[in-house]
Amino acid sequence: MGIDPRQMSPAARLEHLLELGDGNCAWCGFDLSKPNARPTRDHIVPKVKGGPTRLENEVASCGSCNGKRGNDSPSQYIESSRRDRGLDPNAELVADQLDRLNDAIARDGGMRKIRDYVTREAKRVRELIEPAR
């Protein structure tokens, strides 16, 4: 990407996230290009748990999933979506974004409060990919 993600407008950030997720909600797979879709940017590591507003910590999500998820960890929400809603979240995309966030933390420093959380969640989400296949 040629532009610094921190300089992107909210609309450009959402467009990038939609491209990453093939235009679908990361959590339920809903086609976010449909006229009734309400695409949002969802923090993978919730803000209340110290998650930064960084492109690496976001996925495109429908408004419904963003609201339902609340402050659940990514692995918790993937598991509950499968178990309770019969959905197949895009765990690979979520894990890739967590890896990107880990790389950003290593590169830029800071974010001490969430370092262990990001590493742990990336591992847990990766473990959830195999059983789904």
Image (spheres, rainbow, N blue to C red):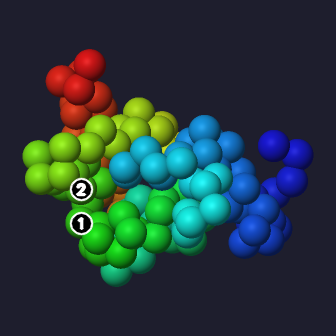
Residue most extreme to the right:
2
Counting from the top left corner in percent of width and height, residue 7 is at 82, 68
State the residue in front, 34 or 29: 34
The image shows residue 71, relative to residue 16, as above or below, that is below
- The residue lying at 19 percent from left, 44 percent from top is 86
Q: Is residue 95 above or below residue 47?
A: above
Q: What element carries label 2?
A: helix
Query: Dividing the image into 4 quarters, which one contains the N terminus?
Result: top right
Which residue is under mark 2?
A: 77
| Disc 1 residue crowd, few under 14, some 14–19, many 20+, Cα 10 Å | some
Q: Nearer the viewer, residue 35 or 29?
A: 35
Counting from the top left corner in percent of width and height, residue 127 is at 22, 30
Q: Name the residue under label 1.
A: 72
What amino acid is at disc 1?
Asp
Question: Looking at the image, which residue is at 64% across and 53% down?
Answer: 33
Q: Distance between the residues labelled 2 and 1?
A: 6 Å
116, 13: nearer the viewer: 13
Q: In which quarter of the image is the C terminus?
A: top left
In the shown orientation, is residue 98 left or right of residue 100? left
